[in-house]
Image: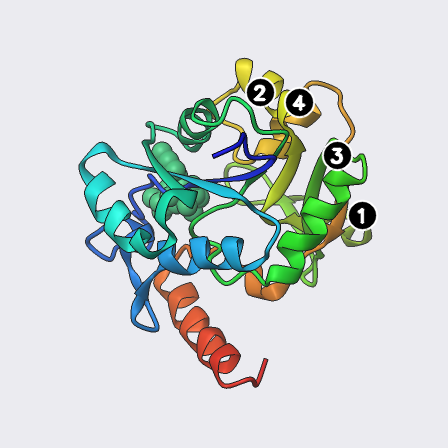
Amino acid sequence: MPAPRVVALVPAAGQGVRLAAGMPKAFVSLCGRPLLWHCVHGLLESGCVEVVVVAVGEQHRDQARAVVAEAGERVRIVTGGVHRCDSVRAALHAVPDAEVVLVHDAARCLTPVSVIQAVVQAVLAGQPAVVPVLSVVDTIKQVSPDGRVVDTLDRAALRVAQTPQGFAADLLRRAHQGASALVTDDAGLVEALGETVATVPGHPYALKITTPFDLVVAEVLAGAKATGQA
Ligand code: CTP
Ligand code: MG
């Protein structure tokens, strides 16, 4: 296979503590298929991702391989790490020749292909780092450790960051060289380098399934999608 140009890295090695489903979140079922299946399927269905690298816990490699078996050699499985950034870095090492790299949470498995395509197009058009974002609908309060409000933030300037986040591969590699475990998204690492991060419109379907409530919402959304109601 020639060196892939656009590669998606899927960190899927988390424990899913907040979902509390008794298994890592990536293997929890949504409409009869694991979250990981939905995530990989969406990336490949976008038509602009050549190879997907999935990072899972060492003991879940075989299970992950079985979940994505139908995609054949377009999907590679690697062993993730303790923190999300360790898992992303492990996946990045597996594709040294990639030119454009997406990083996409397995937990955002209902992301529309249109969002994936918009991110890839923006990077291919010359943006070195691209993040899908949503406006904030709630008023956001900054609070002190003891729970008192210290400030009300200007909602107009705030956005919720989603994935896939897209990068020129060299920039992402540089960003991960000094990665801090405290940074929860890859764009944050790029920002720390002082580089510009562009935005494209995100989508409510790209929600991160984190809690049992989110899974209920996702079941409804997936059902609506399947029946053409959304
Ligand atoms: N992730 C990962 N490796 C880790 C931690 C997280 O690959 N060491 C992945 C998760 O599998 C998920 C994504 O990063 O797809 C976003 O993380 P999160 O939503 O926090 O998932 P979990 O860490 O699994 O959930 P929790 O924090 O509730 O345990
Ligand atoms: Mg986590």
- The residue singled out by tag 1 in the image is 157
Q: Secondary structure at mark 3?
A: loop
Identify the mark nearer the N-term, 2 or 3.
2
Q: Residues within 10 Å of mark 4 (few under 14, many from 20)?
A: some
Chain-order first, disc 3 or disc 1: 1
Inspect the image, locate mark 2, and give the three-letter code of the amino acid beneath it: Arg
Q: Say which label, 4 or 3, has the lower sequence index.
A: 4
Earlier residue among tags 4 and 1: 1
Residue 52 relative to residue 28: left or right: right
The residue carrying mark 2 is 173
The answer to which image quadrant residue 100 occupies is top right
Question: x%, y% of residue 82?
Answer: 33, 28
Q: Is mark 4 within 8 Å of ligand 1?
A: no
Residue 120: mark in rendering: none
**Sequence-first disc among 2 and 1:** 1
Discs 3/1, front: 3
Image disc number at residue 171:
4
Asked whether residue 103 appears in the rendered view, the answer is yes
Q: Quadrant of residue 170?
A: top right
Q: In terms of secondary structure, where does tag 2 sit?
A: helix
Element on which disc 4 rests: helix
Residue at point 46%, 42% (across, down)? 52
Residue on which disc 3 sits? 197
**What whole-number distance in Å separates the C-alpha atoms at marks 2 and 4?**
5 Å
Displayed quadrant of residue 31: bottom left
Q: Amino acid at mark 1?
A: Ala
Q: Nearer the viewer, mark 4 or mark 1?
A: 4
User: Who is closer to the viewer here, 132 or 171?
Assistant: 171
Mark 3 and mark 1: Cα distance apart in space: 15 Å
Few, some or many residues within 10 Å of mark 2 (<14, 14–19, 20+): some
Dot in front, 4 or 3:
4
